[in-house]
Amino acid sequence: MVQEAYSIIRLYYLRMRLFKTLKLLFINFDPKISAKQVDYTMIASCARDVYEDLIGRFCRIGDSQFRKDTITRLGKLKQDSLRKRVIMRSKHTHSSDALALNMKYILEDQSENKLYSHLKLKSQIYDPNDVVFTSFLKLDLILLCKVYGIAAGNVQKSGLINQLCTVIPTLNEMPKA
């Protein structure tokens, strides 16, 4: 912060000095005076100051362009990485949808006593991020209740889900598969 303030003050001072030197050069300029009478130190000083100012401005323009190019390049890199992450997420969600637990998955399970389906149900019940039984119809839940030996009377879908969530974790496999 102090360095920036110092450089700003220095630039202001250099500009004022350059302006005063150019002003003196043009005020004292008389075309009738021969070239021998002109103060060469003042001309050299003005030329040096003009040169330094032009070089400084050129460098600032170069720095500014470099900064713009860098920001653009970084923005493109961030955009590309975000695009890759979005694609990976969408692939992940599609692949997990293919393995999502539904009644079709349970019916097609060929393991002994439908152990894979039971373990998947159990893991979904324990997973706090998973919403269990969202893809099941009420008829599917009633069928699962019969398999697990739960009396499913005139109970709403949420009641069936609660009953299944209490019974399934206590068992090691589907009893009537």
Image (cartoon, rainbow, N blue to C red):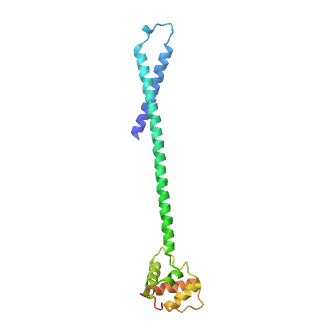
- The one nearer the camera, 124 or 114, is 114
Q: Is residue 12 above or below residue 76?
A: above
Image location of residue 128, percent across then percent down: 47, 75
- The one nearer the camera, 83 or 25, is 83
Kindly identify the residue that appears in the image at 47 percent across and 16 percent down: 25
Kindly identify the residue that appears in the image at 44 percent across and 11 percent down: 38
Whether residue 38 is visible here, answered yes or no, is: yes
Q: Is residue 125 above or below residue 27?
A: below
Image location of residue 71, percent across then percent down: 47, 46
Q: Quadrant of residue 134?
A: bottom right
Q: Is residue 145 above or below residue 1?
A: below
Kindly identify the residue that appears in the image at 44 percent across and 82 percent down: 116
Q: Is residue 170 above or below residue 24?
A: below
Q: Quadrant of residue 115?
A: bottom left
- The one nearer the camera, 75 or 156, is 75
Image location of residue 17, percent across then percent down: 44, 24
How many numbered marks, from 0 up?
0
Kindly identify the residue that appears in the image at 48 percent across and 20 percent down: 22
Image location of residue 118, percent across then percent down: 45, 84
Whether residue 13 is visible here, answered yes or no, is: no
